[in-house]
Every structure is written in structure tokens, then in C-alpha cells.
Image (spheres, helix red, strand yellow):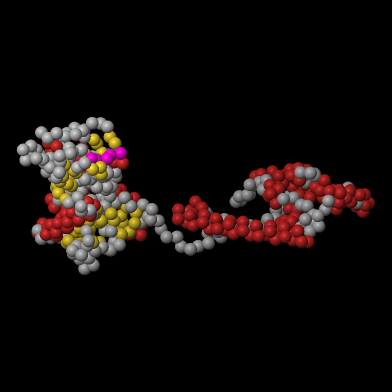
């Protein structure tokens, strides 16, 4: 065996090209290339640190392995031997051969650009594969697949045989020998079951043929082509697919609903994928609810006297919507009026200081003697009214006001004659009167209803006894009812 010097390991750079250098064996000591490879020591050094001594001269050279090489023969370097090796030859070596491993081992001229050499060989390899793929469609097994001759890369297409033909699927083998499939314009997921039995790279015609065979064993998922479901599509979970002139068996459809997670391709015995089956149940339930929902005619339910218990579900919903809209309008009006009042106060109002406010209270107090002189009768209504107004104004918390029964009776009498007049007086700010809620409590002591109420008769008897109507002839009275309310049953 020829004498060899100590071998050193050279590290490689990413995305660069490897160069393998071997001493040509002598005739008497002929050995194969594999016999020249000896186990190297573990001392690794960078390319910049290596100066290779060949033919009594020092030259600095860089050698890298070619990425994505495939072992195609006994003379190829296996994947675990991808780091390039340099051998310092003895000084008697004169002839050196250069090899590069692609689909097979090539010998090349060192004066020629290695990168250009590798690129040319790869293009030749891809072109040869493309020519083989073009001849593949001549087989009757692939009659429904067309080869795209004008494409720069390997591409197969399948279209529907219909009046408005659209693409079924497009299969592409890129120049890095990876494959991708588009179905109805959507890229097939890398997690699809179709890729489980296929290699990651399609370098040979047999691998491309296996890809086409697997594709032809699948059919396109039909989604949900029912006409009554097309208007129920949710933009977040699903979409309506355009017209591809698609059909599957006897089922032809112009549009269909697909989920965003549709698998696109299914087995031939399954019309749709599992994701579209799940979404189909959802839209079916939604369609059933729409059928049960009766259309509600446009009606003003705010003025309707129909009881809520007699309303249907759709009528109740419509009434609630109208009430919500009405309340929103009222809120807007109140806000506008508040702004108007605040603006009027800022422009025309007069602010009273604390001293002026006390002066107004003192003025009313000082006028009390004048009122007493003008109305000497303590039980007269004028004097009662003045005392009630003064009492209300002197209270710090107006909610603690206790109105005199005579004033409450007068207010009930006034409100029964004209509700708008009472409201105008109460909100004028000139005089203070009891609230409508207080008057309501007094007028509705006895629950309203149909017919004569025993409570009302007892109340009249107590009133007559209080007035001293104890004689028999005084107990004969007449009842006058000035208002009758007829309730529809």
C-alpha cells in the first residue's frame, strides 16, 4: 500500500460545494478510491488554518460537501461521510484526479468552475426528469392528467369535463425536487394523509409516478353544496367556494360551503371530509331554526294593548327592539334638553351666593307675620299653603318633607281635573307640590278592580261615623261614579 502522510479533517461551510481530492494510484499498487479513505483523528481544524503541501508548493484550497446529495452507487460517499477530507500526498505524487458526487460520481477539470459545473449537471438532471414526466402522461392510466409543457418546472394539471371547466388539482415538482398540490386554488396541507406514504423528494420518475397514483386515488371534498345552506355561511369558520364546474359522481354543484380547515381531498368512498361534516351539522341546525321563526309584520308594539303573555316569541323580540329604540331616543332628547338648560343658565342665569340664599329664606320668614295678619284664621287654606312652602324651603333634605293632608287633598283634586296643569305648576319652580308618586299612593289605597269593593264601603262607613251621621235617616246616601273603565276579557 502506498505510503501516506497524516490525514487531517477539514470542516465545511453551509450552502457551498464540496470538492473531493484523491491521489491517483500507481499501477503496481492499485487500490480503489474507498481503500484510500482511512479513519481520521478527531482533531478538526477550519479551512483557513489548512495549508496543503502538494508538489513542493503550498496552496490554500477550500472544500465543501454538496447539499442534498443522494448515495447512488458503491463509489459514492454516504451521508455520514459528508465532511470533505484532504489528504496530504507524498512528494512523489504528480497526477491528481478531481471528483464530485451528484446523482452519481463525476470527474471534472479543476480549472473549470466547480459551482457552474454542479449547476449545469443539476439542470441536466432536472431536464431529464421533466422529459420522462412528459412521456408519463402517454400512459392511459393518467388520461385525466395533463402535462404543462410551457411551464419551466414540472407541473401536472387535472380539469373537470364540464361546460364551465375548472381546475381539479395542480401538482408541481419544483427544482429542489419537493412537491406541492393545489386543489381548487387552495394549497394542500403538508399534514394531509396523502404525504404519509410518499418520499420528501421526488428525484426519479418512479417517485413522481407514485405521487400521481396516490393523487388519483383521492377525490375532491364536495363540502356543503345544498342550495338552502348557501346563505348561512359564516365568514370566520367557512367560505363559499366559486364555481369550478365541479362534480363528483352524479352530484354537480356550482358553489359549495367549505370550512377553513377543509382537507380538500378525501377517499373515494367519503363524499366530504370530517371537518366539513362537523360544520354541516351546524348549518343544518341554523337552517332548522330559521324555518321555525315566523316573520313578524311591522307594527308599533308600543301603543298595542295586547298583553305580553299573549305575544309570540318573535313579537316579544320585536317589541323589545322597539322599546330599546324608544328609550334610546328619550335618552338623546333628555341629554339635548340638559345641554340646552345648562347653556341657558350659563348665559341668562343669576347665581346666588350663600348670603343671598339666606336673605331669601329670611325674607319669607319675615313675611310670615304679614301673612298671619292677612289670614288670621289658622285653618284657612292660604295660611296652610304658605306654611307648607316655608317648611319645604327650610329643609336641608327635601325627601324628609311630610305634607299636610289638606294640601294633599287639594293636589289630588287639582291633578284629577288637569294632569298637565299640575305638572306645569310642580315643575315651574315657583311653588313646591307633592310628587305624583305620593298622590298615587293616596289614590290607590284600595286596589282597583271590577264591581263594588267591601273596603270602600267600610271606608265610607268610617267617614260617616266620624262626621256624626249616626241617625238612621242620615245613613241613606247616594253614590256617584263619574268614570267607568271597561276591561276587555
- Is residue 316 located in the magenta-colored stretch of the structure? no
Q: Position of residue 240 (x, y in %)?
A: 33, 59
- Is residue 51 located in the magenta-colored stretch of the structure? yes
State the count of labels.
0
Query: Does the rendering let one see residue 470?
Result: no
Residue that sits furthest to the bottom in the current view: 163
Quadrant position of residue 80: top left
Quadrant in which the N terminus is drawn: top left
Comparing 79 with 377, the one in front is: 79
Left or right: residue 408 versus residue 72 is right
Query: Does the rendering let one see residue 459?
Result: yes
Report the residue at 15% width, 55% height from top.
Answer: 129
Q: Position of residue 470 (x, y in %)?
A: 78, 43
Comparing 126 with 146, the one in front is: 126
Magenta-colored span: 49-54
Residue that sits furthest to the front in the current view: 56
Report the residue at 48% width, 63% height from top.
Answer: 298
Report the residue at 26% width, 63% height from top.
Answer: 244
Amino acid at each position: 500500500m502506498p505510503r501516506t502522510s497524516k490525514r487531517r479533517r477539514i470542516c465545511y461551510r453551509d450552502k457551498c460545494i464540496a470538492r473531493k481530492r484523491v491521489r491517483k494510484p500507481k499501477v503496481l499498487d492499485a487500490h480503489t478510491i474507498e481503500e484510500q479513505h482511512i479513519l481520521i483523528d478527531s482533531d478538526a481544524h477550519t479551512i483557513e488554518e489548512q495549508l496543503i503541501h502538494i508538489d513542493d508548493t503550498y496552496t490554500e484550497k477550500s472544500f465543501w460537501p454538496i447539499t442534498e446529495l443522494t448515495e447512488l452507487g458503491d463509489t459514492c460517499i454516504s451521508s455520514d461521510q459528508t465532511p470533505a477530507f484532504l489528504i496530504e500526498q507524498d512528494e512523489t505524487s504528480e497526477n491528481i484526479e478531481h471528483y464530485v458526487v451528484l446523482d452519481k460520481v463525476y470527474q471534472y477539470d479543476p480549472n473549470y468552475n466547480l459551482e457552474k459545473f454542479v449547476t449545469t449537471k443539476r439542470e441536466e438532471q432536472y431536464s431529464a426528469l421533466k422529459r420522462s414526466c412528459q412521456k408519463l402522461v402517454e400512459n392511459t392510466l393518467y388520461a385525466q392528467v395533463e402535462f404543462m409543457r410551457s411551464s419551466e418546472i414540472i407541473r401536472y394539471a387535472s380539469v373537470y369535463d364540464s361546460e364551465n371547466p375548472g381546475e381539479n388539482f395542480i401538482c408541481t415538482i419544483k427544482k429542489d425536487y419537493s412537491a406541492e398540490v393545489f386543489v381548487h386554488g387552495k394549497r394542500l396541507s403538508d399534514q394531509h394523509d396523502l404525504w404519509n406514504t410518499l418520499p420528501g423528494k421526488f428525484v426519479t420518475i418512479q417517485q413522481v409516478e407514485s405521487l400521481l397514483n396516490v393523487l388519483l386515488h383521492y377525490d375532491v371534498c364536495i363540502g356543503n353544496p345544498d342550495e338552502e345552506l348557501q346563505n348561512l355561511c359564516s365568514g370566520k369558520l367557512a367560505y363559499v367556494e366559486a364555481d369550478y364546474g365541479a362534480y363528483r359522481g352524479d352530484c354537480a354543484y356550482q358553489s359549495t360551503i367549505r370550512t377553513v380547515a377543509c382537507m380538500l381531498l378525501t377517499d373515494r368512498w367519503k363524499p366530504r371530509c370530517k371537518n366539513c361534516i362537523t360544520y354541516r351539522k351546524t348549518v343544518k341546525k341554523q337552517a332548522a331554526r330559521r324555518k321555525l321563526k315566523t316573520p313578524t309584520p311591522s307594527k308599533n308594539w308600543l301603543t298595542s294593548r295586547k298583553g305580553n303573555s299573549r305575544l309570540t316569541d318573535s313579537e316579544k323580540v320585536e317589541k323589545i327592539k322597539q322599546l330599546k329604540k324608544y328609550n334610546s331616543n328619550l335618552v338623546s332628547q333628555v341629554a339635548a334638553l340638559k345641554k340646552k338648560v345648562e347653556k341657558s343658565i350659563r348665559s341668562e342665569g343669576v347665581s346666588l351666593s350663600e348670603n343671598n340664599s339666606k336673605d331669601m329664606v329670611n325674607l319669607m320668614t319675615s313675611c310670615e307675620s304679614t301673612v298671619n295678619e292677612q289670614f288670621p284664621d289658622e285653618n284657612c287654606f292660604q295660611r296652610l299653603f304658605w306654611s307648607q312652602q316655608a317648611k319645604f324651603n327650610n329643609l336641608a333634605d327635601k325627601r324628609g318633607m311630610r305634607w299636610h293632608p289638606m294640601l294633599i287633598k287639594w293636589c289630588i283634586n287639582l291633578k284629577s281635573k288637569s294632569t298637565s296643569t299640575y305638572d306645569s305648576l310642580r315643575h315651574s319652580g315657583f311653588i313646591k307640590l307633592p310628587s305624583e308618586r305620593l298622590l298615587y299612593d293616596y289614590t290607590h289605597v284600595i286596589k282597583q278592580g271590577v264591581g263594588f269593593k267591601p273596603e270602600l264601603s267600610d271606608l265610607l262607613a268610617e267617614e260617616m261615623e266620624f262626621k256624626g251621621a249616626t241617625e238612621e235617616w242620615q245613613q241613606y246616601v247616594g253614590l256617584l261614579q263619574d268614570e267607568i273603565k271597561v276591561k276587555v276579557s
